[in-house]
Image (spheres, helix red, strand yellow):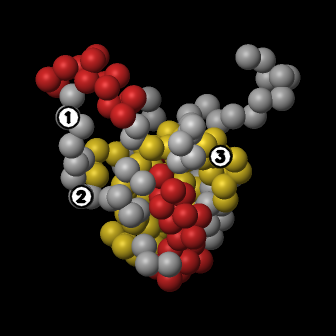
Amino acid sequence: MSDTDGDERQAVLPQLAYQDPEAAVAFLCRAFAFEEASRLSARDGTLALAVLRTPGGGTVLVGGLTDQIRRRMEAVFGAEFRAGDPGWPQLGCAITVMVPDVDAHCDRARGEGARLVSEPRDHPWGLRDYETVDLEGRMWNFSQHLHTVEPEDWGATTT
């Protein structure tokens, strides 16, 4: 794919599978100010995949945990595959989304019933952020760029 073919996808595009993707899309749009750009329905009319735009210009894909996906994972991983409840909250990863005004974003999320893990706070690496979980326990970090700081100035090492 060339830079001139009109495709402006992000280099990293998270695709999140939810038990109830319809409820997830509604929550993400209501609480986190995401906007649904498109959706693909499955043959049975359920949501197969939705493209959501984030307030800072990013994109996430939301879909469901279909029986087809579960069967494929069971076939590939056998006894290693764990299809059960991933736990609450899901601490295996956190999704960071850049937003233009983290305090206003936090106020909106709180007002829509999002459960906050931390209040907005400034960090020595030049970001202000807060953390929350969605309705299925995924960790989300919403960050605002305040100023550029060299890694050595906040205790990291440039590699």
| 117 is higher (above) or lower (below) than 64 | below
Question: Which numbered disc covers residue 88?
Answer: 2
Q: Circle 2: is it few (<14), some (14-19), or many (20+) Cα within 10 Å?
A: few
Residue 48 position within the rendered picture, expressed as x and y whole percent measured from the top left:
54, 41
The answer to whether residue 67 shows anywhere in this view is yes
User: What residue would you read off at disc 1?
Assistant: 82
- Residue at 50 percent across and 43 percent down: it is 63
| Label 2: element kind | loop
Give left or right: position of 7 versus 159: right
Q: Residue at x 24, y 47 (%)?
A: 86
Q: Disc 3 to disc 2, how far (Cα)?
A: 27 Å
Residue at horizontal 39%, vertical 29%?
Answer: 68
Q: Amino acid at mark 3?
A: Arg
Of tags 2 and 1, which is closer to the observer?
1
- Whichever of labels 2 and 1 marks the residue nearer the N terminus, that label is 1
The residue mark sitting in front, 3 or 2, is 3
